[in-house]
Amino acid sequence: MSAFRIQTYIAREVVVNFLLSLTLFTFIVLLSRLLKLTDLVIGSGVSLGSVARLFLAMMPSFMLITMPLSFLLAVLLTFARMSADSEIVAMKACGISVYKMARPVIILSLFVCSATAYLSTYAEPTGRRTMRDIAINVAMDKASSAVREQVFNNEFPGLTIFADKVFKDTNQLEGVFISDTRIDANQTIITATSGKLVTDKASNTLLLHLKDGAIHRDTDNAQKDGLQIINFSTYDINISMENSAAQASGTTLRPKLQTLFQLFNSLEKSSDPQEQQKRRELRAEIHERLIMPLSPILFSLIAIPLGISSHRSNKGAGFALSLAVFMIYYMFLSIAKTLVIEQGWPTSVTMWTPSIGFAVCGSFFLITCAKERSFNPISSGFSYLKRLGKKT
């Protein structure tokens, strides 16, 4: 059998396992959001069309995680099955090295990397922005759906709204309690016996019209008598829903909602030295968008030797180890991003260290496996713990 036919055989099995794994993991992730989508239809009266668009907008965010994970599992399962059926031994006997077996996997990983790059740089932030636009439109069409009864609602930035009763048909509220921190650090408490939500689609704003209440404002925290109380018969609160033009330009969007090109533009515009925190967030987000597409090829380097070595150990343990690899990678990437944003560590070095470390480890494992040296991370780990226990 020629090397090309063997590589085609490996590639076909990886593709089948990848599609099955991608379907399974995406479905599992979507199940976690199914209850919330059902609540929107039944509880808030949102149309099925809006829920369907919201469902589609969620897909890029889910697939950005499930696609690399599915490829990792697909490669692991393929080589584990081939190893268990002694096909790896037969291929080596025919002169097919591990490097030649890995070639179709590397080629497929490049396609998965390209799809992940599209999701990371454009589709995922666009989907997040679409989700927010749908939420804004739902709030404008059904203003009362933005406020749930007897729940502290904090969907609006700087505002926490509590209503004892909510009448969805008339947008009326009763027993209103509001915490407002939009103006300054001092918290303003507003209470009212009743209120009404009025929408203004022209300016994308909600007007909360309150009746018979009081405003409690802390004017000076250093003095005991610094509490200001203002009674009112009517009082209006403007709740701004972000302007569509600003959303399109990306100037007021959070980094997670911006495409890669918008992130670069925002970084160029934020030249003020006082905006160091914002610049760190933008730089960290840019590097994360560039790193994420590389995860499939990094995972394939580790999954191939793990799969081949699985005939020497329990398959379930090897499967669990692959999931551990996935979690460890994203954990280190998350830690690196936190260190850049919160502690001001160097962006490039800190953000790329986990990926470089995984690339070195994966290459080492693959070379070790190709040279037919003893490679079993599970038994090696237990052996190391035993030696450590004897020393202590």
Image (cartoon, rainbow, N blue to C red):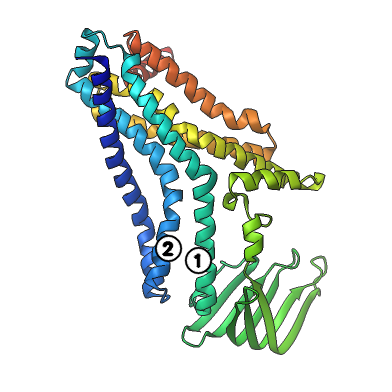
Q: Locate residue 316: give its quadrant.
A: top left
Placement of 140 over or under 59, stated as above or below: below
Residue type at tag 2: Arg
Q: Which mark is residue 317?
A: none
Q: Is residue 121 visible?
A: yes
The structure residue drawn at horizontal position 51% and vertical position 43%, both measured from the top left corner, is: 120
Q: Locate residue 370: give its quadrant.
A: top left
The structure residue drawn at horizontal position 27% and vertical position 11%, both measured from the top left corner, is: 96
Is 353 situated left or right of 391 in this image? right
Q: Which residue is the site of mark 1?
A: 134
Q: State the CA–CA distance, disc 2 to disc 1.
A: 8 Å
Placement of 338 over or under 360, stated as above or below: below
Q: Position of residue 95 (x, y in %)?
A: 25, 8
Bin the neighbour count of mark 1 within 10 Å (Cα to Cα): few under 14, some 14-19, many 20 and up: some
Placement of 119 over or under 328, stated as above or below: below
Secondary-structure class at tag 1: helix
Residue lying at the far left in this picture: please name it.
85
Q: Which residue is the site of mark 2?
A: 53
